[in-house]
Structures are given as structure tokens and as C-alpha cells.
Amino acid sequence: MKSTRPTLAIVAAGLLCASLSSTLPLSGQAPPDAAQRVDEVFARWNSNTSAGCAVGVEVKGLTVLERAYGMSDLEHGIPNTPATIFEGGSLSKQFTAAAVVLLAIDGKLSLDDDVRKYIPEVPDYGSTITLHHLMTHTSGLRDWGSVASISGWGREQRSHDHDWVIDLVSRQSALNFEPGHEYSYSNTGFNLLAVVVARVSGMSFADFSMERVFKPLGLRNTQWRDDYRRIVPGRSAAYDALPNNQWRINRPIEFVHGNGGILTTVGDLAIWNGALTDGRLGGPDFVRMMHTQGILTDGSTITYAGGLVLQDFMGVPSITHTGATAGYRAYVGRFPNQGLSVAMLCNASNAPAGNGGVVARIFLGDAATAPVVPDPVPVAAATLARYEGLYRDPVTGNTRTLVVSGQTLRDGGATLIPRSDTRFQVGVRQQFYDFHASGSGPLWFGIDSWEYTDERYEKVEPWTPSAADLSAFAGTYSSYDAETTFVVQADGESLTLWQRPGRTTTLTPTYKDAFRSDRGQVIRFLRTGNEQVGEFSLSIGRVYDMRFQRQGR
């Protein structure tokens, strides 16, 4: 059984008229205690010794709240205000999508075009990767930042630019999956879209955005961080939170933008939310194309559209996106049935992007309802005990450990609620584990969720290798895709990865020939027909199954 997520009716029925016809329990006004409740949400950052946030709320186009908390610049004692400019992280993606959509409306490109039509440097993987695949994180392309971190030069260690991203993409020998097979968040897609806009328009992506998006909408405080060294009056610094209320500067040092890098204010985000609702920028076609959700190859609809997430929030249709880059955190959301717009921008790494949703909940009032926990179906203790154990994803090597606690099956912190003897719901989420026994093969479960076409985990036995087992893995392994080399070192009963100039990572065994590093990497040693180890597979987050060949054998 495949659960599907239908396209939200607020889009299909005509988002353009939402601001005119929606019914608001708020009658265009904020709840009387709204400001006090919002202040309580941000109280821990409301200090002249803390970085903080700015928040803006509109109801039916009227500003009902603007607040700011903490400091914009701790070194110079400058406080945050509603007019402070922050970096928005990944909520930037909707602005990139907008630029592409405008070119599509101009007839300069189609969202169904192959990305290689504009960026032939992308390898030919035998399957078409469309621009809409890039816009909806269904392309299968590895996330360039994750590849960079494998190389040892992550996004906070080197000033990457778009030429570097294209070079990195050109070297990837494989996709994570066939285009359209599943949803996997990848910044690569939006960096490539920014390059497409530049190549098609004949202007820099930043200039095109200014001329076609920011200026027409009157977004006076919005621009791309295409050069992080440029002076931007009114921009906040960004900070990592350290113990004992200490802070460390952490502002992006990269030229790459389009995936992130939007510099903006909560006031400009309110204007932008209005444009996405009423079509003032590109008319009905613009609104429709921005809200067209991705569809997987199995026909199911995902929640992600043009840099926008369309889903229910506490029973209310919502269109949102969050952002996190360096020390910045961000949230922007619309609730069309209520005419509600919420924007939150922060320069403190410990300010959760989810606080934007907390603010929205305050203004939604009785329209928001708590999710209902389904009633469990009785399942025999023996059946639960059979499901307990270690499971692996055969594609990435990632593991899940299911345990029985009392009468409850759990996956980490998630409670699996039985809906039948073989089907379990993950808490209140519309995600299900379906257990299968395939003859003499191992027990396995499939994950039924909008993100996947056929995600599965097979039961495996934990493994405690001997010193002799570990010594068989020792050697030097290299990857062209990541342009890096790892040295696997066996020392008695321990195994480590060493990488220039001096990074050593400990490997912990999970199942036979597989390990997890203390950096979150999954390392699987792969054997040839004669049982000799010839390479290893590395997976981490948004990179699946990158191969490292053993040298000298």
C-alpha cells in the first residue's frame, strides 16, 4: 500500500483569490495577548549579550506584529530591529525558483527541459534530469556541500563559487537515485538553476533577480550574497552559540548562492509572501508554477514545489520553508485560508527555525488542532520481539535499530504504533513501516511515505570483528568523485580513517564489513569474487554509495 499526498486544494482551487475570500477567525486582528506570547517564545534571546531574531506577522495584508530580540552585532553593541538584514539560508530557494519560472513564462526555457541543455558539464547518466527535478529535490544529484565535506573542505572551510560547484558536479560518477525515484534534499539543484538563469538571460543571476524580482516588488532590502565580502549596511553578523552564554562569529564565507544566500528583512518577506499569493509579479501562471509539486515515478505527489513546502500544519494548510546556514536561522510561512503570513530571521545558531511555526500557532488560534494519536491494534509480544533488531538500507548502508520497550516497538525516539500485525505508523506522521518475510530471506520492512518510491530496510546481525578481520581492511583508498584519499589503519581491535592534513576518524562496526564513523559516515567494505577487499562505499546524508578504490592491489 502506497500512501499518497494529494496536491493541496488551496493551490488547485486558485491561490490567487485566497486573500480576498478566506475566512479568518482573527478578523484581521492579532489575538490580544499575541505580542506577550511571542515575547515569551524569544525571551532567552532578548538580551544585550545575546544574538537574536526579528519577527514579522501579517493578517490579510496588514502588519499586526513586528518585534526584534537580541543583538545584531555583539562586537559593536548594535541591537536587532525589524529592519535588520539577515541571511535566509534555504528559504532562498523559492527566490531561485521564481527566477526560473519567470524565464519559463517568457518562453526562454521550459521546466521540462533537460538541465544538460544549459549545463552540458553535468554528466549524462542515461536519464533526463529536468529543471523541475532540480526545483523539487527529485533529481538524484548528490549534494555538493556534502561531497565537499567528504573531501575535507566543507562549506565553512573554503570560499566556494559556482564554477567550483559545476566542476564538482562534472566529476560525479553516479546519481543517488534515478531522477524522480524519490525526494532527497540537494542544494546542487538550486545552484545549477542559478547558473541556468545566468546562461539563459545573459545576466548574472544576482542582476537578473534584482531586475525581475526584487525591484518590481519593492524589496528594497533584499539582494543575493553573491560576494560575501561586500559591505551591506544594516546586515547582522551571525553567531554560533557556545556554553555559558558565549558566542563565536559564524557568517558564510562562500560566493555560492541560489541554494541559500538571500539577504533580506522580515518586512520584505511579508511583501514576498503577498506576491506568491496574489500573483502581482507574474500573474496566475507564476503562482501556479511556483506551487506545482513534484511527482515521483510511482505517481505519488510530494510536498515540495518551487522552493516551497506544501503541507498541513496542525490541521491547517500551509506553505512554508525554513533556512539554516552558518549561524543564521530562518522561517517563512503562509496560511492562505487564514490570510496569515509569518516571517522569522535570526542570527543565533541556537534559535530553532521551528520557532516560526510556534509564532504561527499563536496567531492561528482555534484553527490549529493537535494531531490525533491513532489507537493501536493489539499485536502479540512474540510478533513485536521478532521485529526487534538491527536493519540496513542496502543502497546507502544506513541502519535503524528497532527495540521493544514495554509493549511498544520503537525506532530511536519514534514510537511505532501498530495498525495491523505487519503495518506500523510512525507516531502521528503519515509514515508507515510495513514488515515482510520473504521465504528463506531476511525479514525486512518498507517505509511507506511521500518521500520514497520503494525504501526498504533488511534485518542484519550485529558484528564484532576480530583483529584479523580489521587488518584485512587496512590500505589506501581514493575517490575521483571527491578528489580525496583515505588511509584505513588497523591497530589491534580498532579501525580508523586518516585523511590529509591530519584528520583521523574512528570507525565503529555495525554489521559485517560495515562501519559508522564518528563523523556520521557509513563505510562498507566491498569484496571481489575471491573475497578480497577491493573498494569501500561511503554514504553520508545527501550522498549515497560513493566508491573509493583500493590502491596498490
Image (spheres, rainbow, N blue to C red):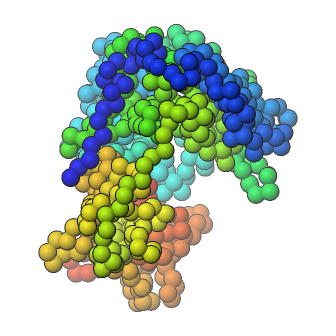
The front one of 143 and 457 is 457
Question: In the rendered image, which quarter contains the C terminus?
Answer: bottom left
The front one of 425 and 194 is 425
Res 479 visible: no
Residue appearing at x 37%, y 32% in the figure: 305
Asked if residue 296 lies left or right of residue 98, the reply is left
For residue 252, which quarter of the picture? top right
Asked if residue 324 lies left or right of residue 371, the reply is right
- Residue 517 percent coordinates (x, y): 49, 69
Q: Is residue 419 above or below residue 48?
A: below
Q: Is residue 456 above or below residue 531?
A: above
Q: How many marks?
A: 0
Res 291 visible: yes
Q: Is residue 220 above or below residue 157?
A: above
- Residue 159 percent coordinates (x, y): 59, 41
Residue appearing at x 53%, y 12% in the figure: 217
For residue 33, which quarter of the picture? top right
Q: Is residue 483 above or below residue 47?
A: below
The front one of 114 and 22 is 22
Asked if residue 359 lies left or right of residue 47, the reply is left
The front one of 224 and 328 is 328
Asked if residue 254 lies left or right of residue 296, the reply is right
- Residue 538 percent coordinates (x, y): 40, 63
- Residue 300 percent coordinates (x, y): 25, 41
Residue appearing at x 23%, y 49% in the figure: 2
Residue appearing at x 29%, y 36% in the figure: 6
